[in-house]
Image: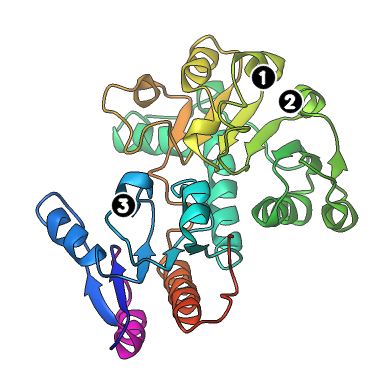
Amino acid sequence: MQQKVVIYRELPEKVLSFLKSKFDVSYFPNLNNENYREFLYELQTAQGLLGASMKIDQELLDQAPNLKVISNISVGYDNLNIEELKKRGILATNTPGVLDDTTADTVFGLMLATARRMPELDHYVKSKKWEGTKDEDVFGVDVHHKTLGIIGMGSIGCAIAKRARFGFDMDILYHNRSRNEEAENKFGAIYCSLDDLLTKSDFVCLMVPHTPETEKMIGEKEFNLMKDSAIFINGSRGKNVDEAALIKALQEKKILRAGLDVFETEPIEKDNPLLTLSNVVTLPHIGSATTETRAQMAELAAKNIAIALEGDTPPNLIR
C-alpha cells in the first residue's frame, strides 16, 4: 500500500507528477475555508505533509497521527513547532541554498528602490506631475561606495555582501552569532557589535531567522542608534522588528527610509500606517518569488519528502 502525502501548496506539474508516481497524493493547491475540513480528513492517514507557511502546531499535529515527515518549501521554518515534532518523532526539512541569489536580488532591489525613491517617483511621473526640470525634491541618495551593515551573515547575507562589494564597491560590516571567515576573506566584511554596526552603517539590512531570541531585536533603541540618513531593509521576518518603533522612527525622521518585504502581520493590515508613508517601499513577502526559483524549491522539497519516506536521511533535515 502506497504511503500518503498531503500537499497544501500549488506545485509545478513536473514536481506533482514525480510525487504522484511514488505516493498516494492528496492535493490542495488552494487551501481555504471551504476545503480545510477535507484537508484535515486526508491528513489523518498521511505519512507526509508538504507545503509552506502554515502554522504546524500541536493542534494540527493531533490531526495527523501517522505523520512521519514535514517538507517545508522555504528556508525559514518558524511556522514549525520543532519541539513538538521532536516529541512525536516527526522529521522536518526545508529548502536552503536554491533561493539565496534570488532573495539577495530582492533585498538589493529594495536597497536601490528605497535609496533612489523609485516607486515614489514612478507614481510622480504617472500622476502627470512631472512638468519640467526638477531639482532636489526628486533627489535620492547613492548606494555605491556606502557602508552596508548586514545583521545575519548566513548564505543569503553572503550573497547580498557579494553584490554590494563587487557590484557597488560598498564597505561591509556584519553582526552574526559567530564570525564568518568566508565573508571576511571574500568580501572584506568586518565583524562588529550590533551597536557599532547600527551607528556606522548607511544601509542596515536585517537577515536573521525568526526565533524567540531575534523577535523584536530591532526596536526603538536600535533605530535611535542609526544615522538619520540611514536606510533600513528587512528581508528576514516581520516579527524580528518592533513595527511600532519602526513607524515612529520613520515618522519622526530618526531614519531616512525603509524597504520592507516582510511585516508583523501578513498580509499587512489595511490600516497599517506604513502604507501611508512615502519614505517606505513595501513588497508582499516575495523574496524568493520567481518562477525559476520557486520551481527549484518545490523540486527540492519533493526530493526531501521522497527520500525521508523511503527510509533514508533527507539532504536538508532540520532535525
- Choose between 53 and 291: the one closer to the eye: 53
Give amino acid for label 2. Leu
Secondary structure at badge 2 equals helix
Q: Nearer the viewer, mark 1 or mark 3?
A: 3
Residue 149 quadrant: top right
- Choose between 105 and 317: the one closer to the eye: 317
Residue 293, relative to residue 204: is it above or below? below
Q: Are marks 2 and 1 in contact (CB under 8 Å)?
A: yes
* Residue bounds of the magenta highlight: 9-23
Give amino acid for label 3. Asp
- Circle 1 packing at 10 Å, graded few (<14), some (14-19), many (20+), is some
In percent of the image, x 42 and y 68: which residue is there?
68
Specify whether residue 189 is painted magenta: no
- Left or right: residue 59 versus residue 207 is left
- Circle 2 packing at 10 Å, graded few (<14), some (14-19), many (20+), is many
Between discs 1 and 3, the one toward the N terminus:
3
Q: Position of residue 151 (x, y in %)?
A: 70, 38
Q: Nearer the viewer, mark 2 or mark 3?
A: 3
Give amino acid for label 1. Glu
- Choose between 47 and 219: the one closer to the eye: 47
Residue 77, relative to residue 262: is it above or below? below
Residue 193, relative to residue 59: is it above or below? above
Residue occupied by mark 2: 198
- Left or right: residue 228 versus residue 296 is right
Q: CA distance from mark 2 to mark 1?
A: 7 Å
Residue occupied by mark 3: 62
Residue 156, relative to residue 7: is it above or below? above
Between discs 2 and 1, the one toward the N terminus:
2
Of the 4 image quadrants, the one containing the C terminus is: bottom right
Query: Which mark, by number, is residue 222?
Result: 1
Secondary structure at badge 3 equals loop
